[in-house]
Structures are given as C-alpha cells and as structure tokens.
Image (tube, rainbow, N blue to C red):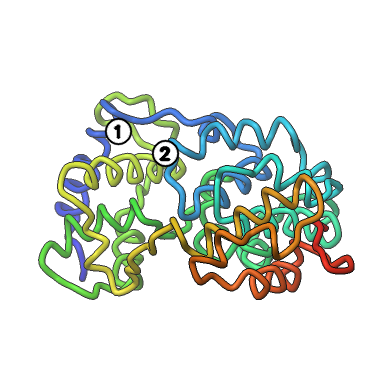
Amino acid sequence: MQLSPKQTRVFQEVVLDYYRKHGRKFPWRKTRDPYAILVSEVMLQQTQADRVAPFFVSFLNAFPTVERLARASLKQVLRVWSGLGYNRRALFLKRAAEAVMREHRGVVPRNLAPLDALPGVGRDTASAVLAFAWNERVVFVETNIRTVFLHHFFPRQRKVRDEEVLELVRQTLPIKTHPFSRRMGESIEIREWYDALMDYGAMLKHQVGNPNIRSAHYVRQKRFVGSRRELRGAILRKASRGEVHVADFAAFQEKGLPVSEILSELAAEGFLRKEGRGFRTT
C-alpha cells in the first residue's frame, strides 16, 4: 500500500492531535540513557506500561548502571523483578548487561545488529532503543503501534502481516524531526512520534476493542491461573528465599502440572542450580 502525501498528513495530524491533548507520562520518557531505555523496553515486552512504571523505577534504583546489573546475582535481580512476570526477561536482561560489559566495554551499542544480538532483545526492541535513546529514524512495531495501523489502514482485512504494517510505519515517519512543543504545526522528534503512536493505540484498544486479533501474528494469551507460567513464578519466588524441592509444590502437582520437569527446565535455562535433591537460585 502506497499512501499519498495527503493521506500521510491527515494520519499524522490525527495521531498528534490526540497526543497533544492526552499524551501519557512515564518515567522512561524522561531519560535518554540507553541503558535505562533498554531496561524499559525489555520490561514492556508483553506487559502494559502502567504496570511496568513502578517496577522500572525500583529496578533502576537497585541497578542504576549496566555494570551494577551485570555484577548482581540472579537472585538479587529476580527479587527486584518479582511481581512483574515473564521472569525470562529478567534473566535475559542480566545476560544482556553481562554481554555489554564483556563485548562492548560497558557501553550499550548504538547500532542495530549488536543491539539485536543481545540476549532477549530482538529487532523490534533494538529498534525501539535506537529511536528512544538516539532519535534514530528506524521502524518497528509493537502491540499499540500495530493497533493504530490495523485500525486506520486495514479496517476489514484479516491476517495482516507485520511486514505490511512496517511499510506504513516507514511511510508515515515524520520528515522534520525538531523537538515537539505541542503547538499545532510544530515538527516532532522520532522518539515522540513513537510515543504518540503508542498512546493513540492504547486509547483505541479501550475505544474500539483490539484490532490485533486481525494480525497474522496474533496469539491469544493463555490463562495464567493453573498454568506452567504460574508454577514457574511460584518456584522462582520461593527459590529466592532458599532451597526448593518437588514436594514444596504439591498443590500444583495435584492440578496435573509437571513440577519435576519444570524445576529441571528452570535449571537448564540458568535460573536454578541442583543441589542434592533440591534446587537453589543461581
């Protein structure tokens, strides 16, 4: 799909008009520190921004630099992360910090390929870091951005591929990228354009439902209670306080969950180490 200049301009005005009036404030929007932005972007994977905000502040208070995070024990990291969920992200973030110290002399890389190669990052998260930390003209998609483009440009189409969305993200990037003063007619930085898209997309989800169900990449989130994910979280919370055993999770076994298998899985991933008949956080 090729947009005309008029279509692009009208679309940008709709998004920016909403942002001028209703733009949200989050702590990661106050910083240009690439490490802090990397932390926020990993936290925002699969978790809503309002929920992430207090965890982001607590995490940076505990680990204010990439070096401090790299040197921390996994037990310390998981303790601060506890409650945010999807604990693999905490492990990956610590491993990413270690890689930055080991391979990049403690400096978060400013190029897409080395950022993409960090554990748990990937191309979209790497591109987001480039946009928010350095105002780079990169394209990426996440759930709220996808919502905006599906709503405006694919209102009846199903199985829309992200490649189609990304092409429209590219076409609608602002050309003039001066700081945005929230006055009509002003230019906008790339980082604020993405903030505007995300805020507008979050609103659309509340107003019109979730257009993401029409994405080719949509996967319905599985029920948390009684799931393997709930058990993994319970194991890691208990392990942060000391040794754990299969018998500690009998209630989950009664629900048919394979406790022994998941303990071994967590050990293989690097969360736990086996000691005799029990497991401890690494």
The location of residue 54, given as percent across then percent down, is: 55, 31
23 on left or right of 46: left
Residue lying furthest left in this view? 156
- The residue that mark 1 highlights is 19
Residue 229's disc number: none
Quadrant location of the N terminus in the rendered image? bottom left
Give the amino acid at mark 1: Tyr
Q: Secondary structure at mark 1?
A: helix
Please report the residue visible at 48 percent of the width from the left and 58 percent of the height from the top. Answer: 138
Nearest the viewer among 25 and 16 is: 25
The location of residue 90, given as percent across then percent down, is: 66, 53
Please report the residue visible at 19 percent of the width from the left and 62 percent of the height from the top. Answer: 3
In this picture, is 84 found above or below 115? above
Nearest the viewer among 208 and 151 is: 208
Q: Secondary structure at mark 2?
A: helix
- The residue that mark 2 highlights is 192
